[in-house]
Image (tube, rainbow, N blue to C red):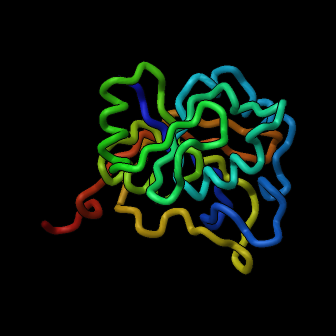
Amino acid sequence: MPDLMVDLIISLDGYAAAEGWPGLWGKGGPEYLAFLGEDAETRHTTLMGATTYRVMSGMHAGSPDDPMAPLPKIVFSTTLKAPLDWANTELVSGDAVAAVRELKRTSERPLRTLGSLSLSRSLLRAGLVDTFRVVLFPVITGASGKERIFDGYPDVSLDLVSHRIFDGNLQLLEYVPTVLDAPPGAEG
């Protein structure tokens, strides 16, 4: 059964993006960018929602140097219509949790989300996430931050399994998540 990784980039204060800031908050250095292009990073199926698909396909689809072109991609959406323009992209309009549960049962490739905050939240709640990875960018976007990542999440305990520093500044943290019914020590 393939692993499912939720893969997020975040500001120190927990935002996925910020108004007016450049991509990767202007902090994507050569080590991190090289890491994104490593072969091991492209041996999975990418899962995303419609909003992430629109952003990412707008940046990459049709580009001759699209690093994600050969990568299988699945988009969960009831608003997009097939066929999708981005190479190797399948549209699933049904229940994402049920579809991912079936993919985990039948696929041979690891699965990884790309952004897609509500999709990632749903998959975590359903107990389908094996690894939760964040790359922490050293910025606080309190005035301009948008898309708070963890709003609406259940309580989750995280056990650190891997960490790495890129460019002396960015922290990659990988955890095994455990969704909790209640905070530890809460009376049931």
Task: Look at the picture and state if 179 lies above or below 14.
Answer: above
Q: Is residue 188 left or right of residue 16?
A: left
Residue 94 vs 138, above or below: the answer is above
Residue projecting furthest to the left: 188
Q: Nearer the viewer, residue 116 or 179?
A: 116
At a point 25% along the width and 63% down the height, the residue shown is 182
Left or right, 174 with respect to 182, comes to: right
Q: Quadrant of residue 55?
A: bottom right
Quadrant, the C terminus:
bottom left
How many marks are shown on the rendered structure? 0
Q: Name above or below for residue 64 compared with residue 96.
A: above
* Residue 122 relative to residue 72: left or right: left
Report which quarter residue 186 is drawn in: bottom left
Name the foreground residue: 81 vs 19. Answer: 81
The quarter of the rendered structure image containing the N terminus is top left
Name which residue lies at 85% across and 42% down: 29
Q: Where does residue 87 sit, x and y in percent of width and height?
A: 65, 33
From the viewer's perspective, tell me whether residue 149 is left or right of residue 101. Answer: right
* Quadrant hosting residue 84: top right
Which residue occupies the extreme bottom position in the image?
143
x and y, in percent, of residue 147 in the image = 60, 68
Residue 48 % position (x, y): 53, 47
Residue depicted at 34% across the width and 40% down the height: 99
Q: Nearer the viewer, residue 61 or 158?
A: 61
Say which residue appears at 83% left-offset and 52% top-offset.
Answer: 27
Where is residue 163? Give x, y as percent.
61, 37
179 shown above or below 163:
below
